[in-house]
Structures are given as C-alpha cells and as structure tokens.
Amino acid sequence: MTATLKVLALGDVVGEPGRRAIKEIVPALIREEELSFVIANGENLAGGSGITESTVLDLFSSGVDVITSGDHIFRKKEGEDLLEKSRRILKPANYPAGTPGIGSTVVNSKDGGRKIGVLNLIGRVFLKTVNCPFEVAKREVEKLRQETPIIFVDIHAEATSEKVALGWYLDGQITAIFGTHTHVQTADETVLPQGTGYITELGMCGPYKSVIGREIDQVLRMFLTQMPTKLDVAKEDARISGALFEVDAQTGKTLSVRRIHERISSRTKTGATRW
C-alpha cells in the first residue's frame, strides 16, 4: 500500500470525440503515472447532452472509476435508470429530493487499498435554483469523512466566484475540489493553506476545433442571428483536459496539483504534449 496516491480528474467529456480521447489517452496515463483513481464528468457523454449505457461503459472500460455530472444529466431518459443502478455515477447532491440517483459515493482505489470519496455539487449562479451547495457540501463531507479522509469534490458551476468561494469554504475538510461546466481549463491550480487541492475549471475532453465542443459555424449563426439553432458536437482535434492530484494517503491532504492537457494526435505521432 503506497503512502501517496495519484488521482486524475477530467473535465466534461463531450460526445464521441471526448470518449475517443479518453479511450486513446487515459489507459496509457494510468500506466505511466501509476494512477490510483480516475474521475470524469460525464454529463455531455451521449451526443453532447446526457448519458446512455454504452457511453458510460466507454468510460468505465477506459479506466474511469467514478462519473460525475451536472445540469444535463437527465437529458436522456436512460440516464435516470443508470443513476438508480450504479454507485459509480453521480448526480449533483444538491438537486431537490426525489431526483434519481446519489450525489456522493465511496469507491475503492484501483489496487483496492484505499477508500476514495467523491461528492458532486452544482452551482446556483446563472443556473437553475437548487439546494445550497455550501450547506449540502458540509453535510455530505461530514458523512464521507466517517469512511475516508480522501474526498474529491466536483463543483459543476457557471460562476468562477462560486467555485472559488466553495474551495475556501471546504479547505482542510476535503482532499481536493475542482470545477467543471465551462469547458475552458483555468491556470489557477494550487494547494490551499489547509491542504486542499484546487482548480477553478478542469476544461473539456472533446473536440477543440469548436466552440466549447460544438460546431463553430452553428454557434456563430446563433450569436449573430439570435435564432434557435441546432448545435452539433464538433469532430476534430480531440483532446483530454483535467488535473492530476498527488495525495497523502494517510491524511487525505493534497501534496501537489498538475494540469493535464493532451491531444490524441500528439500522443500517437510524436509523444504526449502536456500543458
């Protein structure tokens, strides 16, 4: 049993290009970095919105251990059944009572030696009204800490301020917190004063010749005309984006945070290109 763990957190996986990037890159990263655990946000897995059984299996078969989500998780009816059946797929814990699924879980590390807690939250600023993420976080973290000191939080939110505030609120109580939803990786990875790893936004796993995963011409038409427009998932320049946290397995504190950003083409042709 190692004294440290390496946990990879990946941003929103967008459609087939995102799933393909995960398949091509993540298994190799697991071997190269000796990763203990992988978390990925999957709310955009199936055609850019929602989840299906086959798209979830794509991630699990590539080495993802827990799938988090956000405001698109219920876009496909099949998602409700998947959330009810699996403890490895999460909805935001601060969704109203009665929505299918669970918002937090504890899953063993890849070697079976450590329990790792994962909590999924969604923000309220510029999104639908849900229960307070701060209050729910406090309750859920207290519950998870009864099983393990190693706890990761995905805050799926629009507003940078809300993500930053939640990071400070939870500093010292969890291992790490990372933001998802806005699809553009931020450069503020850090370890907060009381040992909690933090990054405002992990970025996107998907097609980067796009506007945050969608076809450029369609998005431009929408902005220029303000007319309802179908926004298809783009196809080119598939990449993964996220952060790698090195963790003290005894205390659950983060020792370091490193951004991860890789192209499929870079890895298969000239070796990995990382930011």
Image: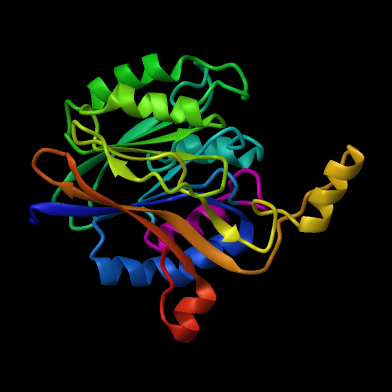
211, 238: nearer the viewer? 211
Q: Give the residue at x 65% y 37%.
A: 77
Figure quadrant of residue 200: top left
- Residue 153 lies in the magenta-colored region: no
Quadrant position of the C terminus in the picture: bottom left
Is residue 117 at all visible to an observer of this figure? yes
* Picture layout, residue 117 above or below residue 183: above
Q: Magenta stretch?
A: 46-63
| Percent position of residue 222, x then y | 85, 44
* Picture layout, residue 151 above or below residue 8: above
| Percent position of residue 171, x then y | 26, 28
Quadrant position of the N terminus in the picture: bottom left
* Picture layout, residue 3 above or below residue 154: below
Figure quadrant of residue 176: top left
187, 171: nearer the viewer? 187
> Position of 121 compared to 137: left or right?
right
